[in-house]
Image (cartoon, coloured by chain):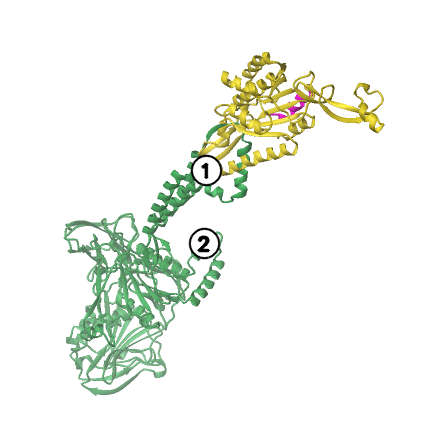
Chain colours: A green, B yellow
Amino acid sequence: MSFLGAPYLLLLAVVPPAIVLLYFLKLRREEQVVSSTLLWRRAVEDLRVNAPWQRLRRNLLLLLQILVVLFAILALAQPVRSRTASRGRSVVILIDTSASMGTRDEAGRRTRFEEARRRALAFLEGLDWSTHAIEEMDPAIVTDDDRERMAREAARLDALAGSEEIALVAFDRSVRVVSGFTRARARIADALRSLEARDAETDLARALEVADGLAAAKAEGECTIVLFSDGAFGELVGARPVRTPIQFYRLGRLETDNVAVTGLSARRRLSGPGYEVFCRVEYPTDDADARERNVVVDLTLGEAKGPQHTRGVTLAPNGSAPLLFESDSDAEVGPDAVEVRVSLDVKDNLAADNRAWAVIPPQRRIEVLVYGGRNTFLDKALAGLPGARVRRRPASALPGASEPPPEEWAARAVVVFDGCAPGRLGEGGGYLFLNAIPPLPGGSASRGAERKAPTLVSWDTSHPVTRFLTFADVELASASTVALGPGARPLVETEHGPVVAALERGRMRLVATGFDILHSNWPLRVSFPLFVANAAAWLADAGARGEIESVPCGEAIEVEATLLGGARRAELESPDGRRTRLAPRADRPAHFSDTGRAGLYRIRSGNTLLRSVPVNLLSPTESRNAARESFSLPAALDADGEEGLAALAGRNVEIRAEEGAPAAQEAIWKVFALAALALLLVEWFVYHRKTWI
Amino acid sequence: MANLGLDPDFVRRLAQLSLVSRRILSGRMRGERRSKKRGISIEFADYRDYAPGDDLRFLDWNIYGRLDRLFLKLFLEEEDLFLYLLIDKSLSMAYGNPRKIDAAARAAAALGYIALCDLDRVSVSAFSGGEEVSLRPQRGRAATWRLFDFLENVEPEGETDTHAAARRFLLRNKRRGIVVYLSDLLDPAGYEEALKAIAASGMDLYVIHMLAEEEVDPDLAGDYKLVDVETAEPVEVTASAPMRRSYRRVLEGFCATAKAFCARRAVGYTFTTTAVPFDELVLRYLRSAGLVR
């Protein structure tokens, strides 16, 4: 049994002693003069000797009154008891930690997540556990060691009794199996208590997939998924059918009031000095009576205390407003990277989406050195690079294999070899080989046979060089495959093999193509100048579009060894001030995945700030934080039964929110209230019959 | 002041009674009672061997003639009787409605009257802790009103100290007689020593154990702090039914103990309450107890 209104139990410490006190006051006995107390004294002693229960009987009224109060307070504390009838069942608790769970539906009350956690804990209490009391023990008396020992023992007993096993999965954008199936309830409860809502989006589909996977280890029909969520996760796209039954407990209100920043990017102007900060503010609402809202948007640059720019914007319900903060001069931002913070001065129920961070990248001049003959298309593409300085050298100026590479090839310059190749390459630097093979040490790079009119079959859209590009409309007259040896990454492939590949080795990056662009229609396609710009940026180690990309909350920050320069270690400072050591290696970048809080994650080496990485929520679906009563999933395939047919027909099943508290519990306050009433009647009877029974 | 409440009719009925003593006591004057003293009355009592110096007038010459031995004829001597009325006048006797002291005084008045009518000597002592008031031995009907007057003026005061009272009484009254002791026997120190002392002195002792009706069946229900009227000692009592039953048991035990104690020492014992009309007490109870005939 557990209590939903446990604070009421504090009354127990106050009321019964008060009754006893009143009893003492009440027992100011009537004074009566008698001839002698001799016989009375003996009678009292006689009674004490003969009837040990007499004292209790004497105070029967007091006893009854205390019982009445006890039961009344217990009823007030809303006791619930386990209703889980079948033992040996397993439960996967799935708890939503996404940003919308941070919504405080009523000012001063719990957030949705806090409520979910409370209910999940109550749910835990409601299950049949022999470990029940362990964690309630006074920490002053019971040490952690004792507790652990007892928990082990209790878990052993539970195992003998075949009681329930619980797994705990927290999810937002990422899905974390906090605890696999266990009977150690205290561990689950501790894990639950340590969870917090994060600023990330929701990926329920994957969470259900993981939970279903966990449940698959159990016999069919033995496991249930208990989902605590507000349902603010948009439609489930690409969800797979879930075979395990789901109990969905909805948190939060169905109508909300939330204004959010849903987009933010900051960059230097492509031409000339100055910056542009683009920001999008939305007012998603499901409230039919919602009115227009005036929102003040503040922009803070760098370490400034107050906002430098402030804009007012009026938002219609479900409307959005784009805002552009810009400047023509670098007076405010200087040449280095500048942190940008946008915040809404507004009162709504979700604070997490009222702020967003960005970083204006440092001024950068890309030095481009081109070896080879004239190539108009290449020249034009290079000329379009923002802040790039292009210099040409004839192919004859290339150093031979015995000569050292020129100084100017050093890091941060991009060297383009158009149809020609040097005798050797330096240790660092960025190199673009067009229709040429780089002279890698050991001859690990090679070129395949030339094929006529190959078809481009696939391209890597995730690599910074070819990100967002399509090669579907590119045709080549002829091409040879390019093999760059170990660590190479094919970017564009024909049916015979890669024709564009990238390689990163130590402080050197290079991209090589195995065809002549002039014998293709590529220069006429939009992907070409973008490819050149991307390649130049990547090779010069800059962001693909002259911006520092914001990382979505919950996704890992990747730190490459090149960022550190010569240093071997760096520290990553989270917005809350925590520092984590990172040690990326040349062949394996370090990842930092604890990005649950939005804000700027600063990578430092000693006292030098290497980079600020903005981590943001920026999610319209998450900001539309009205709770939802139901969501639909594809029906599970069932060998026999309607659901199976439904799945075959591509139908969805609707998961509706359960009513009230989790099903494992049953409110039993009425029993206590009735008991209190009955006792009150007995007390009344006894009071009147007291002297005659 | 004790209220005797004697009505003339009752006084007349009292006159018809006469005291009877289970022992034969010796008296100072020849009265209507046989005395233990062998004397010159006409009623033969016993023989004994002649010892030199005996009055030769009482030698039985007939026996001498037959047995050739000298025997002395003994006769019982009739004497008047001493009746000592001992009244407990401690504060506890003021309890009850009517008060125990009143009932005791009335019983004493009745007994005293009967004794006076039979030409017996009557003396009254009313005592409490340190106090004692007494009426010198009276004789004859004429003393009736002195007796009544004395009894009317007995007022309860002080604590019970039965033992001290008995010692004082025995010191002052050497002559043997009937002692009627009217008390509630509620002495924290115990009444046993006192009764033992009186009985041992050769007195013919009767105990009239007088309790108030309120003590026998207390009308208490609820929580009380009972205060002893003499010692002011409090006892906290929740007068529930079990408690009342327990009290009743204790009371019965107390009376039974007193009765058994008296029986062992050939002391007459009569239990009465203030609810028993005193004439009934005198006429029936005392007769059944052998105090009056």
Q: Main secondary structure of the magenta part?
A: helix
Q: Is residue A58 left or right of residue A331?
A: right
The residue nearer to you, when weighing A25 against B204, is B204
Q: Position of residue A412 (x, y in %)?
A: 30, 68
Residue under label 1: B240
The residue nearer to you, when weighing A54 against A547, is A54
Residue at the limit of the structure toward the top, as seen here: B142
**Can you say whether A422 is above or below A140 in the image?**
below
Q: Quadrant of residue A480?
A: bottom left
Q: Position of residue A351 (x, y in %)?
A: 26, 53
- Asked if the stretch drawn in magenta spans residue A222, the answer is no
- Element class at badge 1: loop
Alpha carbon distance from label 2 to label 1? 43 Å
Residue under label 2: A137
- Element class at badge 2: loop
Q: Quadrant of residue A275?
A: bottom left
Quadrant, the N terminus of chain A? bottom left
Label 2 vs label 1, nearer the camera: 1
Amino acid under label 2?
Met
**Can you say whether B225 is above or below A669 in the image?**
above
Judging from the image, mark 2 belongs to the subunit labelled: A
Q: Position of residue A607 (x, y in %)?
A: 39, 58
Residue B232 appears in the figure: no
Contact, mark 2 vs mark 1 (Cβ under 8 Å): no
Q: Residue at x 17, y 80 (%)?
A: A518
Magenta span of residues = B160-171
Q: Is residue A273 left or right of residue B266?
A: left
